[in-house]
Image (cartoon, helix red, strand yellow):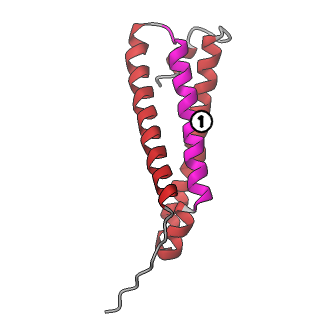
Amino acid sequence: MAVRSTTITVNAAFLAEIKEDNRRLRSLLAAALEQTVLRSEYGRLDRQRVELYVALRDQLAFHFTLEDAFGYFRDALVDNPRLTHRAALLHAQHDALFREICDIVEVSEQIQYGESGADAEESLTE
């Protein structure tokens, strides 16, 4: 049985950037989830939480940009074309996820600046 193998060259600086981006994204996501759960029980949306949502949105945009720019999906498909359908589904989730975090940021900022109704904050935890 023949086994096909390929060699992938990865720039060490780029690999370090990817790892740091992943750590930062996971940290922001955990902090945002924790703040959403804890603070929703104890009162109004504060500036710190809104800034956390904004940072999460910006980091997610950076993360997706890295994936697209450096071919996370494209390069994997060259090596394993049978994953094309699954990769397309995963990549399509990026837009939906990013739109959701953008909506969360928008509602949060509206609440922070008093531009929304009283039920808007409840919509953040739905």
Give above or below for 116 relative to 22.
Answer: above
- Which residue does the image show at 53% across and 33% down from the upper left? 56
Residue lying furthest bottom: 1
Residue lying furthest left: 1
60 inside magenta stretch: yes
Q: Secondary structure at mark 1?
A: helix
Spot occupied by residue 111 in the image (x, y as percentages of width and height): 61, 13
Spot occupied by residue 62 in the image (x, y as percentages of width and height): 59, 44
Residue lying furthest right: 115
- Which residue does the image show at 46% across and 52% down from the upper left? 16
Q: Camera-side residue: 102 or 15? A: 15
- Which residue does the image show at 61% across and 12% down from the upper left? 112
Residue 116 location, quadrant: top right
For the record, the magenta segment spans 44-70
- Which residue does the image show at 51% across and 25% down from the upper left? 52
Q: Camera-side residue: 32 or 24? A: 24
Report the label total: 1
User: The disc labelled 1 sits on which kind of residue?
Assistant: Asp
> Disc 1 marks which residue?
58
Spot occupied by residue 93 in the image (x, y as percentages of width and height): 54, 49
97 inside magenta stretch: no
